[in-house]
Image (cartoon, helix red, strand yellow):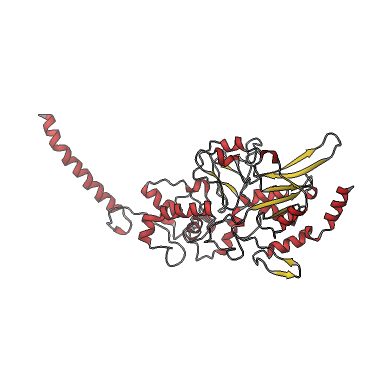
Amino acid sequence: MIRKAAIEKHGTDPVFDPGRRNFLGSMAAAAGITLAPGVILYGIGKSSAASANAPTAAVTSDVRWGMLIDVNRCGEGCDDCVTACNTENGIRGHGRETTDAQWIRKLTISNPDNGTSKSLPVMCQHCADPPCVEVCPTGASFKRADGIVLVDKHSCIGCRYCMIACPYKARSFVHEALDNQKPHAPRGKGTVESCTMCVHRIDSDRQPACVEACSDTGGGAMLFGDLNNPASEISKRIAKFTTQQIRADLGLDPGVRYRNL
Amino acid sequence: MGLRRLNLLLPVFFLLCMAGFTVGYAASEPGGKTTGVPVPVIPAGKGETCVEDIDFMRRNHMDLLKHQRDETVFNGVRTRRHSLKECVSCHVVAGPGNVPVSASSPKHFCRSCHDYAAVNVDCFQCHASRPETGALAELTDRDILSPAATAGTD
């Protein structure tokens, strides 16, 4: 009953309106502008409003990028986030389901006791304490200052330790020689890869492709933002609502949070 | 005795062969030019100048790229001046149908010199060797070398 009430409230909550979020996204470059009394556009720059959109500025730990995914808003048959990710990063399958690269996937979880099921996207959870980084023998697997976990493919030797270490099965190994890669998303045979949180977009003050697609054509379940900034929309919602991290018991502190899981 | 004479004759024979080769090569040069050494035909890039002096770029482009690559991967610095993406966009070479050629073509800017110097580059196993298709609309005919201008590269 309480939960239903919460969902109803959530449904009418103006901050969940995807249209409004689009507007916020498009205005994101104008960090910190007061739109109306009490409504402040939050910046999604590299570290602060001052250095937003500066390609020369190195990323800092002032920000920690994260996502909040509202599972109740994630449609069971919808895979717009997966399609957007594949298009954005030039990921094409080779008809080999067991080994084809998968940066984001849709999972359906069900409760056999009462028959309920839920659908949610799972990708690299961008842990604060990533096990993939810990096991990497070459330092290829690393966490950027702003919390994004990446693979430096120049030093990746393809040993796949990180794939074994990751509790979220978030990483893929490229088995085939590739061509026609996207200029912003280099990918190649013999290296491990995973969700980059669309780091190339973030560096130019844009949202990850999956978040954009979810808000454009999906259920508006995904929210991207700065977990370190208490004024950011994502931090406000995390402070207001109960959210979960998958396998929080492992103590990895993932940057991807779920609501209504 | 026969062996000694052979020892004397071999260098002479070798020199004669070399002379014959040089003459033959010079004669085969188009326009009767006698440059002697074949040089790679390097397609011109867009714009008037490269991001640094050409002499400097010929010797140091790999260091610039490597430095930029680490800055971009680890620090998110995405300045365009020394980025591989910018090299590829500026030095785009048109193939059949005015479609930019990829590194699989010997006409590709990087390959035109690397093939000649027999230095293998791994960059394009992962990186795109031509601008994204969407970016082609931004290129004018003048930006892309016409196929005729690059016909002599292979």
User: Going by the image, does B128 lie left or right of A239?
Assistant: left
A12 relative to A35 in the view: left or right: right
Asked if one can make out residue B154 in the rendered structure from this viewpoint, the answer is no
Q: Residue at x 67, y 63 (%)?
A: A28
Task: Indicate the position of residue A5 as horizontal and vertical percent values.
Answer: 88, 51
Give the residue displayed 84% in from the left and 58% down from the top.
Answer: A12
Q: Is residue B145 above or below residue A68?
A: below
Which residue occupies the foreground of this view, A207 or B62? A207
Q: Which quadrant holds residue A244?
A: top right
Horizontal and vertical percent position of residue B52 = 41, 62
Q: Residue at x 85, y 52 (%)?
A: A6
| Residue B136 % position (x, y) | 57, 60
Q: Residue furthest right?
A: A1
Q: Nearer the viewer, residue A138 or B129?
A: A138
Q: Position of residue B149 (x, y in %)?
A: 44, 60
Taking the view exactly as shown, the residue that stands out farthest to the left is B1
The residue sitting at 85% across, 55% down in the picture is A9
Specify whether residue B124 is in view.
Answer: yes
Q: Is residue A101 above or below residue B64?
A: above
